[in-house]
Amino acid sequence: MKRQPRSNLTNPTSTNKSAWLLIALLASTWSTGAFANRLADIKSRGTLICGTQNASSPYGYQDPKQRKYVGYDVDICQALSSELGVKLQHKPLSTEARIPEVKMGRVDIVAGSVAWLPKRAEEVDFSLQYLQGNIKVLVKKESGIKTLADLAGKKVCASSGSSSAAIAQKTLPKADVLTYQNISQCYLGLQNDKVQAMSAGELVLLRFANDSQKTDTPAVLLDEPTATEHIGVIMNKGEPELKAAVDKALTAMEKSGELDKIFTKWLGNDSIYKLTRTFKVVPVAQLDSSAKQ
């Protein structure tokens, strides 16, 4: 007599599906664990890979005399690595590469003057605020442009991938906003009348304005800012330990006076800007009302 198949025998198709589900679950767990352990990886290798901009004075740029990268953000990277008890591996980046480099895991963090914006917050996590500044517009003095409203129908340049470009699209809807690879190219475009204005951080524009005074066509900043930026260190999503460690380090830098020291050197009384620091080390998303408009 033939035996009937037992009803509780395992179905091969069902087994395969269960196996794939288990593999997918494990892969998800391993992936999450890899991101969550990035701080452990930093400690293990003994270095913090911290990116900054590569051509944005006074934040991150190559000093031709010292033949090395210097700036506010470079010093922030150094201070953060010291607080974490590891060495610094500095990585200079173009403005548009800041977020992609973080997402691809090529850097641990970026202190690259990245302003908090809702869309950016969907891609990366932000630390507490470590910098704040106004976005302004630079025009030729002879242009007759006095206000933001005067930019209607005019070509306004901003650096590709910058918050200045994103903000200009919102706050200057009647202007023709163009993006160049970097802010130096924008300035060249302004000098050659390819654009009538350029938008960037106030400090960056002040340097160009000062340099232009030596030429036949001096440039000036418009009084009205397009926005106020609230800036944090960025890191990949799903790295809570790293975010907590960076926030703790920034808080310690605030209490020790290290943050004030760095600000004074690059932006305050020891610099050409002579600015007074007014911002606090607090969550950036709570401050940025301009980005939510």
Image (cartoon, rainbow, N blue to C red):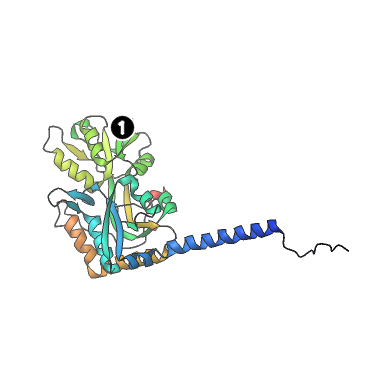
Please name whichever residue, 119 or 69, is drawn nearer the observer in this view of the structure.
Answer: 69
Q: Where is residue 156 in the image (x, y as percent from the top left)?
A: 30, 35
For the point 37% across and 65% down, the residue is 41
From the image, tell me which residue sits under label 1: 155
Q: Where is residue 203 in the image (x, y as percent from the top left)?
A: 22, 48
Q: Image check: 219 left or right of 158?
A: left
- Residue 162 visible at all: no
Count every numbered label the image shows and give the total: 1
| Circle 1: residue type | Lys
Q: Is mark 1 on a helix, strand or loop?
A: strand
Q: Position of residue 47 (x, y in %)?
A: 29, 63
**Residue 17, picture quadrant:** bottom right
For the point 48% across and 60% down, the residue is 31
Please name whichever residue, 238 or 229, is drawn nearer the observer in this view of the structure.
Answer: 238
Please name whichever residue, 129 or 40, is drawn nearer the observer in this view of the structure.
Answer: 40
- Residue 282 visible at all: yes
In the current view of this chain or complex, which residue is farthest to the right?
Answer: 1
The N terminus: image quadrant: bottom right
Q: Position of residue 234 (x, y in %)?
A: 36, 56
Q: Image check: 151 left or right of 122?
A: left
CA neighbours of label 1 inside 10 A, class few (<14), some (14 to 19), many (20+):
some
Relative to 33, is 160 above or below?
above
